[in-house]
């Protein structure tokens, strides 16, 4: 799957992933009204509104980008109906030819990680059949439990030719409370980055490993260091736009081949119609068009920064 991601990025000239992280506050009122009129003020009604919102956005952007990244918590908050909306979103994105990065941030002891890996990336045995459950192409993983927690995911990735993005240096303001702590004179995120590179050596695609890393756009100097430590690991970069990450700060996350990183924007795309410059051009009924324009502008911004780097 990492080879397919590279191919799609090259084909579209778009190292961009859209974060499908819908809150009800992002959904236009007319969609919420339609869903609640049909299902009542219920979890089913909320989940239907989320699904209708997602589908409209995907219909407007699927031809521009290689991948989407649904954040599972935004669906889990609506219980079982929310998870059904998550599954419908994953399946619909696959129908549209998109790669799906499930932002699930799983990670536990070995047997539990094995179950997470089977549920999200692999298959579960049901009688004589092996069945896929959520069936994402990549997922995000928390490495806090060390190799015991990561190996089951790597094993499934090897079998299914799917991939991981392991949290290394996250974009949130308090990430440094743990990730920047010095261990033997070096910050923890460097030690984690080295382990990511080591884990990835076992499962290589043509040019990049199945095992990638999450490195936030808000810490570009740390991103430079981590790019050197993980030359064969694809980097998923959150924090662009709404969290303050700028295109010119991200060029060092990429390798000389123009690959090696994919930049995520969530609110900046799916809630574009609420923010300038799009709010003055698109109303709530044109939220899909606003998202499309936001994607076009983001691709142009990042590619412009990469070209300026030379």
Image (cartoon, grey):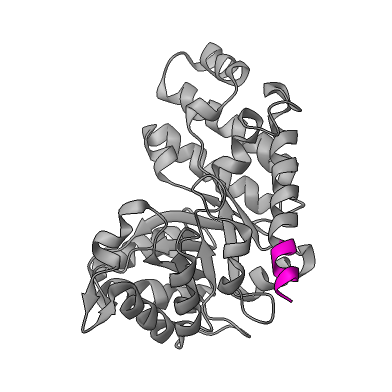
Locate residue 73 relative to residue 4 in the image: left or right: left
Of residues 203 and 267, the one drawn nearer to the viewer in this rendering: 267
Q: Quadrant of the C terminus?
A: bottom right
**Horizontal and vertical percent for residue 281?**
76, 28
Look at the image and say whether residue 132 sits in the magenta stretch.
no
100 up-or-down from 61: above or below: below
Name the residue: 22% across, 68% down. 109
Picture quarter with the N terminus: bottom right
Residue 263, percent from left and from top: 59, 60
Q: Position of residue 199 (x, y in %)?
A: 39, 83
- Give the residue displayed 51% in from the left and 73% down from the top: 160
What is the magenta range?
Answer: 303-310
The one nearer the camera, 84 or 142, is 142
Q: Quadrant of residue 170?
A: bottom left
Q: Is residue 57 above or below residue 98?
A: above
Res. 280 visible in picture: yes
The mark total stands at 0
Q: Left of 151 or right of it: where is 215?
A: right
Residue at the location (45% across, 54% down)?
103
Taken as a whole, is the magenta stretch helix, strand or loop?
helix
The correct choice, above or below, for 243 with respect to 158 in the image is above
- Residue 120: image location, x then y, percent: 44, 59
Residue appearing at x 56%, y 72% in the figure: 253
Res 128 visible: no
């Amino acid at each position: 799957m990492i080879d397919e991601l590279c191919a799609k990025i090259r084909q579209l000239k778009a190292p961009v992933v859209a974060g499908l992280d819908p809150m009800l506050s992002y959904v236009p009122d007319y969609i919420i009204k339609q869903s609640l009129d049909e299902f009542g003020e219920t979890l089913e009604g909320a989940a239907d509104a989320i699904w209708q919102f997602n589908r409209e956005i995907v219909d407007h952007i699927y031809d521009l980008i290689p991948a989407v990244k649904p954040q599972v918590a935004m669906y889990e908050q609506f219980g079982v109906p929310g998870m059904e909306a998550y599954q419908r979103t994953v399946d619909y994105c696959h129908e549209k030819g998109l790669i799906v990065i499930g932002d699930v941030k799983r990670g536990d002891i070995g047997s539990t990680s094995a179950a997470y890996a089977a549920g999200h990336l692999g298959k579960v045995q049901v009688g004589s059949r092996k069945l896929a459950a959520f069936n994402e192409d990549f997922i995000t993983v928390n490495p806090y439990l060390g190799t015991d927690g990561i190996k089951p995911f790597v094993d499934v990735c090897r079998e299914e030719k799917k991939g991981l993005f392991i949290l290394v240096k996250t974009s949130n303001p308090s990430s440094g409370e743990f990730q920047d702590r010095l261990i033997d004179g070096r910050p923890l995120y460097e030690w984690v980055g080295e382990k990511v590179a080591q884990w990835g050596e076992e499962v290589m695609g043509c040019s990049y490993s199945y095992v990638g890393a999450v490195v936030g756009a808000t810490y570009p100097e740390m991103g430079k260091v981590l790019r050197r430590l993980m030359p064969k690991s694809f980097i998923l970069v959150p924090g662009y736009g709404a969290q303050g990450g700028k295109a010119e700060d991200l060029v060092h996350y990429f390798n000389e081949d123009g690959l090696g990183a994919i930049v995520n924007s969530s609110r900046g795309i799916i809630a574009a119609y609420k923010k300038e410059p799009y709010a003055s051009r698109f109303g709530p009924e044109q939220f899909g068009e606003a998202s499309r324009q936001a994607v076009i502008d983001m691709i142009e911004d990042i590619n412009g920064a990469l070209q300026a780097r030379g």
